[in-house]
Image (tube, grey):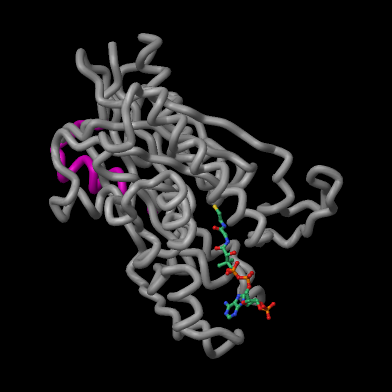
Amino acid sequence: MEAKITAIGTYAPEKVIDNHYFESFIETSDEWIRSRTGIIERRFSAEDEYTSDLSVAAVRDLAKRYNKDISDVDFILVATVTHDQIMPSMGTQLQYRLNIPNAAALDISAACAGFGYGITLARSLIHSGMYRKILVIGAETLTKVTDFKDRTSCILFGDGAGAILIEAAENGNIGECIAGAEGSGGQDLYLSTQATQVNGTPIKANNKIVQNGRAVFRWAVTRMSEIFEAIVEKNGLRKEDIDWFIPHSANMRIIEAICQRVGFPVEKSLESLSRYGNTSSASIPLALDEAVRAGKVKKGDKLLLLGFGGGLTYAGTVIEWGI
Ligand code: COA
């Protein structure tokens, strides 16, 4: 059996925050944020709204729009770095709240590459013959772990969730996947409640995202250009065959630089960051779903998805859109 994406759904909190919001408490401007990142606005979750709530809403959106019975889902994979709590996992909470009696449930900790890892794992689980119907969710409430005193990072993050359903089918539409890790860069992007060390570097224990923006930027541009090429090659394609490139939406300049390096037209890339900021594991499904709803992504289009982020991690694949 092969793996096929049969439905997609998303959800973002109602509260829209524009760039001017930050001007009252940090030294910044709408102009700086737009030109250095491409972000125009983002969503903030309500105080009592958590990642599990966003995830449930995204899955309900998926079930409603595609008229899907999800009660026989047999695996739930939730990619997040902002669980409501460490234990019980988000997966188990969704299993209960969505009333899916016989599903295994697991959270994926691969930061902004989490959704790509989820697709990679779901495809493998279906190809193995052990599972037939899998929910993959990327969901974050990053603004709950954002350091609003750090002007270099607080302007970047937003909240949102995306979900896809992957089912066993004779003719699948998920191509060869590449997932990898470069732990040597772990200290450049972290979130910790304990004052431990990463690669010998002491880290802060403030439960806030800390990043070396320039280092992550450099790594993303150089390595993800290579991984883009590797995914194309592994799928026996040429880059001209790709209709849409959907990278993790971290920074528009990262997307432009990758496209320039690999010689791929940036107009054929899809992003969610201008409207949602960096939503980590939710950024790819948010961009994809928006393009699906707008009729931009059509049946038969080849999509190259590529997530990258803290760990450092990356994961991507090619999907032939089929719904
Ligand atoms: N408003 C105004 N000025 C700011 C600012 C803000 N919000 N944040 C930083 N600056 C200033 C810096 O202090 C610096 O000033 P200086 O030259 O006087 O020292 C200047 O702008 C340039 O800083 P720099 O860090 O070189 O900016 P940049 O162009 O690299 O952009 C990021 C910063 C964070 C937007 C960018 O590095 C980035 O997006 N990195 C990747 C982050 C990321 O994607 N992380 C998640 C990956 S999954």
Residue at the image position 24 percent from the left and 31 percent from the top: 320
**Any part of residue 2 in sight:** yes
Residue at the image point whose x is 14% and y is 42% from the top: 298
Left or right, 43 with respect to 28, comes to left
| Looking at the image, residue 286 lies above or below residue 96 | below
Comparing 42 with 174, the one in front is 174
Residue 64 drawn at (x, y percent): 17, 44
Query: Residue 311: which quarter of the image?
Result: top right
Q: Position of residue 5 (x, y in %)?
A: 26, 30
State which region is magenta: 54-70
Quarter of the image where the C terminus is located? top left
**Residue 69 within the segment the image draws in magenta:** yes
Give the total of numbered labels: 0
Q: Look at the magenta stretch and give its main secondary structure.
A: helix
Is any atom of residue 139 visible in this view? no
Residue 159's quadrant in the figure? Answer: bottom left
Q: Relative to 200, does residue 41 appear above or below in the rendering?
A: below
Measuring from the top left, give residue 258's x and y in whole percent: 46, 50
Q: Quadrant of ligand 1?
A: bottom right
Residue closest to the eye, 136 or 216 = 216
Measuring 60% from the left and 86% from the top, which residue is drawn there?
A: 27
The answer to whether 182 is drawn above or below residue 198 in the figure is above
Q: Measuring 51% from the left and 37% from the top, which residue is drawn there?
A: 226
In the image as oriented, which residue stretches furthest toward the bottom? 24
Q: Tell me if residue 180 is in the magenta stretch.
A: no
Residue 102's quadrant in the figure? top left
Out of 98 and 39, give the one closest to the viewer: 39
Q: Position of residue 296 (x, y in %)?
A: 17, 51
Instruction: State which quarter of the image contains the N terminus.
Output: top left
Q: Is 221 positioned to the left or the right of 2 in the image?
A: right
**Direction from residue 219 to residue 41 in the image, left or right:** left
